[in-house]
Amino acid sequence: MSVYRVTDLIGTSTQSWEEAAAAAIKVATGTLRDLRVAEVIAQDIHIDEAGGLTYRTKLRVSFKYEQ
């Protein structure tokens, strides 16, 4: 029997939504072990006052609880 936790993460990038998602997963693997699934929940773009773009990807990830 297994138990999984589901949590949301938001990654950011100035290059793309894909890089934003990859950044979130890369950071999460530093503290969460046994990540199983990452699902894209939402994507948006933040536009700053100077017109700079920041891509944001919200992910729902699941990981297995250790026994």
Image (spheres, rainbow, N blue to C red):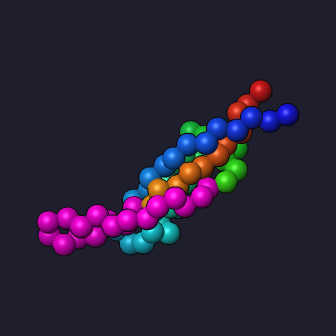
x then y, percent, for residue 33: 66, 41
x then y, percent, for residue 21: 50, 61
Viewer-proximal residue among 45 and 16: 45
* Image quadrant where residue 3 sits: top right
Q: Is residue 50 visible?
A: yes
Left or right of 46 in this view: 33: right
In magenta stretch: residue 45: yes
Which residues are drawn in magenta? 38-56
* Image quadrant where residue 1 sits: top right
Q: Quadrant of the C terminus?
A: top right
Left or right of 65 in this view: 58: left
Left or right of 3 in this view: 44: left
x then y, percent, for residue 18: 50, 69
x then y, percent, for residue 4: 70, 38
Q: For the point 70% across and 33% down, which residue is it?
A: 65
Total labels drawn:
0
Q: For the point 46% across and 61% down, which residue is it?
A: 42
